[in-house]
Image (cartoon, helix red, strand yellow):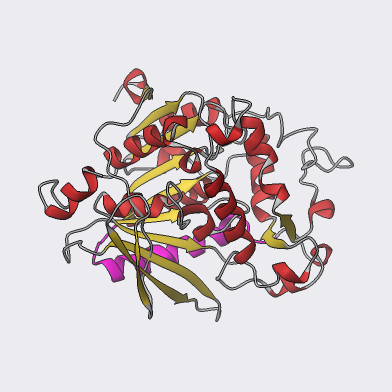
Amino acid sequence: MTNEAKHAVVTGRSRGLGLGLAAIVGAAITVAPALASEQTFARSDRFIDLPSGEHLFVREVRWSGMPAGGNSAVLLVHGARVPGLASFDLPVPGGSLAADLAAAGHLVYILDLRGYGASTRPAAMDEPPAVSAPLMRTEDAVADLAAAVDAIAQWSGNSKVSIVGWATGGHWAAACAARYPQKVDRLVLYNTLYGSTSDHKTLGHGSPLEDPKNPGTFNAAAFGGYKLNTRASLFPAWDDAIPVEDKASWRDQRVADAYADAALASDETSETRQPPSFRAPTGAMADSFELAIGKRQWPASALSMPVLVIRSENDFWSRPEDARAIVDEAPDAELVTIPGATHFVHLDRDNAGRSAFLSAVTRFLKPTSTPEQPWSRAASER
């Protein structure tokens, strides 16, 4: 594939896109109505036991009418602050990427890395943040992802699992895929840092992430092992990226409210602080600082599987140079740029980039099942 063929820009509305809601496996399976249609989706929650005695939380989402067998498995990986369910499975219209992909014919799995959501939190997260160094670095995330991919392959009956990673989740997903390419079917990275250049306006040199006494070093003393995040802290960067004054015209307020509610609910200690706040490990910020100043942590050339890189034009996290470098270095990769879209493109309104994003992802993640099957036709006709 030539470099020119690898780069594309998506404009306008999606073409033939099936929308829906999805989640994962567990003891108690609940079926909830899809909010944008009459379809229903089955959600089940499981835990993966790690050799350390810790556990990982995983949710499976599938369309309840999906035939057994023959369906590809897709793992969704959250970013630096907000865990899996709040990122990918909100109970409001337009708030569940998991359901959208389930309606397109996939078994969808949502993971919380250790330190996030319902997965085990390091003991240091029960102490003041200053007690520990930044928690959950890339190596920790790769270990968790590898364990999740192995479990999902067993649950789903697929020898390989596709991974979709958002922001730092894309960085972690790519690091895992580069380490274990034989486990990954397809890889989607959106708004992901790579370390293509040493310049970054908000995360690199001269930012609060840099130790002022030791340039080129993460400011671990200021960040500690984890950070407390309030409802109000979730929206300034999102609001700043929306290119219109009326934010509600770009982002459904129901989605924004559900996102904040789910983020706070992900931490059982949230209500013990005023204002309520949820904990998130700071290892992701330490890794991101290194990427922002040009220190790569995985080689795109090792991504031997098909790779789709998506970048929102108004993303504040990744840089155009990151997206281009991944695509140019990976053996089989393509780039889609979504004009005007924000870092939170999968949670914005359809006409604000969400439809274009979903169209690109569903086209790339080719389901094993054929479009002629009744469940697939029902999804596409919504």
In magenta stretch: residue 101: no
- Judged left or right of residue 121, residue 331 is left
Position in image of residue 302 (x %, y %): 41, 43
For the magenta stretch, what is the residue range? 135-160
Position in image of residue 298 (x %, y %): 52, 44
Position in image of residue 336 (x %, y %): 40, 28
- Judged left or right of residue 288, residue 185 is left
In magenta stretch: residue 159: yes
Q: Quadrant of residue 363?
A: top left
**Residue 374 in sight:** yes
Residue 170 vs residue 341, the one in the foreground: 341
Residue 328 vs residue 168, the one in the foreground: 168
Q: What quarter of the picture does the N terminus occupy? A: top left
- Name the residue: 38% across, 25% down: 10
- Name the residue: 79% across, 72% down: 127
- Judged left or right of residue 343, residue 190 is left
